[in-house]
Image: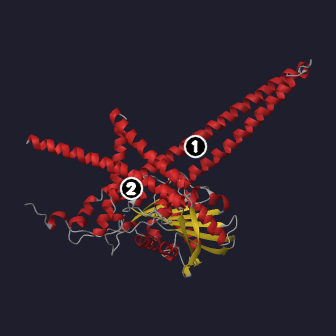
Amino acid sequence: MYILRVDQFGEPRDREFAVQAYGGPTQANLVLETLQLGSQQLRQAARIAEEQRQDLASIADEIFGSLAGFAPHWRIPLFGAQLGISTAQSAIGSSAMERTSDAVERAHESYRETESLVVRWLGAAQQITQYPEMYPHIVHPQGDRALAAAWARTALVNLGHAGVLLFARATRKQPAIRASGEAGGLVAQTLLEEVRRASKASTQTLNVDSQQLPRMESHGLTDYLEAQAGVAAAGDFSISSSTTQTGQRHIVHIPGLELPEDLEDMDLDALAAGELDLSAGRGVNSLADAVTNDSANLQEVIGEALQRSGAETGDELLISGYSQGALHALNIAAGGRLARRYRISQVVTVAGPGREGPIAPGVRTTSFQDVNDPVPRLMNEQSQLSSARVEIHYEHQAPEGRVGGIFGQSHSYTHNLEAIRILEGDANTHLDAGQREHLRELAEELSGEHQATVYSTEWDAAGTERVQQTITEWAGRLQSGTEEVRSGTEQVLSGVDRVR
């Protein structure tokens, strides 16, 4: 029998706290955004030039389409020639400015796509290549099991995305594989569309009762996030308001997904039987709202709660979110009901999935995530970086970390809070000057006294039933497919036994 010895897998070593930050006011971002601003001005100038061309053409039609154009004066033909030249120059100038603007926009899109790809896949590659250093934690009796479990879950997600990428490349040369991939994609899109329709047809209602958390003094970002730790147990989101030199400021915090306690024991049979509880305000209905509906339902109830708290049109709004709440926060920052009514200035996300596309102009966003947290990678989307957006990835080995939770200990709110506290205490080591200033301004805006009012919500019974029916049908299809695969496998094994 082969037995592993301690000297074969080595001693587990503590992982140093490490940070990789992206975005912020870097030279590349500032140059790109300056070019974008110039592109917008060129497009405006092109529109003005086109209007001038139309005016000149209209003048030419009026003059030379009437008897005035036949007046026996030598200046008339000369004027006509000059008018024609000016009209042509306006057309050429307008076209040139349009082409230049289009080229700048294409260059910006190409850079952002490449940047997103580099951040996504370089991070995944770095995480997976940690295996030799993680192996001792997996097999050694004194290894950090919580760290190993969190790393393994994230590696599986990364490998899954890599498999999808390789599959996509294979389909280019293999028609049969491409056909099966397109069929699978069609099924996924159909399911997503069913969930989207059910989510849009659902209604999220703000409950009458609210609850106030104890008043707390915040001296920075970590203090503020710690003050919001009790929101999830009390309701679905919180609002705290204060008066600043520029007017009223309202801070909204949105916790993460609320799942049934017995979810880990739930299998496809239970899902197909409709046993998943969808009544929670931050449950699966809310997840569908975030993923397929740009958080339209949540924006509606938050808007109602803000009006209850005395918010006026044009007031400043800061939003923070954790996990699923982080995706809601990014949806709100990208536009919608709240962005039209209030001035959103800052968005903070912790351990949240990415959201493809830019954030609305004027909104500064700061995102925090652990490299060994699978949740930010689940959707395989990367938020677009900019001079106003900073994304901070850290590796934090918690000294008292425990194995547990459906997403692992690196996803927990407490774990990320500890990491952000370390980062905030030693920002000079981990961030460049622009990113430090970005973080300092955020901490300054979140400092002060907070009296959070927590609001809870509920979903209408009909909408809940529609979403549950969609999930039940989806689970039934998977269950049927699993049974077919199992049956086919048994037939193959039976045939092998007969051959033997």
Label 2 crowd bin: few (<14), some (14–19), many (20+), radius 10 Å: some
Of 333 and 7, the residue lying toward us: 333
Q: Position of residue 10 (x, y in %)?
A: 19, 66
Q: Write the residue at 42% across / 50% down.
A: 118
Q: Which mark is residue 495?
A: none
Q: Earlier in the sequence, mark 1 or mark 2?
A: 1
Q: Residue 418 lies in what quarter of the image?
A: bottom left
Q: Tell me the amino acid under the disc marked 1.
A: Glu
Distance from label 1 to label 2 (Cα)? 27 Å
Q: Write the residue at 57% across / 54% down.
A: 30
Q: Position of residue 450 (x, y in %)?
A: 58, 78
Say what secondary structure mark 2 lies in: helix
With respect to residue 343, does 60 lie above or below?
Answer: above
**Residue on which the image places disc 2:** 123
The quadrant of the image that shows the N terminus is: bottom left
Q: Position of residue 485 (x, y in %)?
A: 26, 46
Say what secondary structure mark 1 lies in: helix
Of 6 and 224, the residue lying toward us: 224
**Residue on which the image places disc 1:** 105
